[in-house]
Amino acid sequence: MNRFHRTELLLGPEAMERLQSARVTVAGLGGVGSYAVEALARAGIGHLRLIDADVVSESNLNRQLFALGSTIGRVKVELAAARVRDINPRCEVEALKTYINGETTDELLSPLPNVLIDAIDTLSPKVGLLQRALELKVPCIISSMGAANKIDAQAVRVADLSKTRHCRLARFIRKRLRRRGIHTGITCVYSEEKTASIELPDELPDFEAPSKTCDGQVRAPLGSSPWLPALFGLNAAAEAVRFLIRSE
């Protein structure tokens, strides 16, 4: 029995062949990235490169797919890769326990993926990754904006970065990229929900207790629902699949 028969009935055999030959890179396996990986694996993507330098912590339990009582302390990329292989043994999975910065970005994007999903939550590496992906001409770049401090599932949107509204993170990233001459070309998953004013730190936290990033940056906590990060991740995966199966 073809594991993806139901998907093939929906999309057709040609679309499934495109998905099976596609290369998708997911950077960040937290609340957003974990659900994006889940949907991509179940869609039959043939090659997944998964990037995250972190391990599961207790504070991840409310929103991250790989976070369970039994997985606390385990490496996220290893858990993700094992789950993908269980869903689709034919998928080629690369699990890279690597922190994304200026020294690693080129290597992480080589060979170029058909789609990059950016689900990282530290600002400087996020902006650097998006800039380099555009410079290298990754065909499709999808970036998750801020899912923290939001609860309205109906306010989630998908648009080019230049057209996002009511998202502080998107506005902050737009300003940084404009300084580097970049104005468009990044598909964003974001929320138009209006929230109370929050002072945005340079590093963008999603933990419930103060912690440190892999490069030693201190992050303050932000509240996060179980459903918004998942919706962001599923929307990112849906956009990736739509791009991959569209007719030339």
Image (cartoon, grey):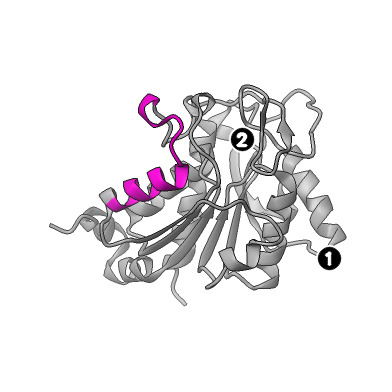
In the picture shown, does residue 38 fall above or below 18? above
Q: Identify which residue, 93 or 239, lies in the foreground.
A: 93
- Image point 83% across, 63% down: which residue? 180
Whether pointer 1 and pointer 2 mark residues with C-beta atoms closer than 8 Å, the reply is no
Instruction: State the residue position of label 2.
Output: 147
Q: Which residues are magenta?
A: 69-85
Q: Main secondary structure of the magenta part?
A: helix
The answer to whether residue 96 is left or right of residue 148 is left
Q: Where is residue 194 shown, x and y percent of the image?
A: 71, 29
* Corner quadrant of residue 179: bottom right
In the image, taking residue 92 as reference, residue 229 lies left or right, namely right
**Residue 85: x, y in percent?**
30, 53
Residue 172: x percent and y percent?
79, 45
C-alpha gap between disc 1 and disc 2: 26 Å
> Label 1, on which residue?
181
Q: Is residue 211 above or below residue 241?
A: above
Quarter of the rendering occupied by the N terminus = bottom left
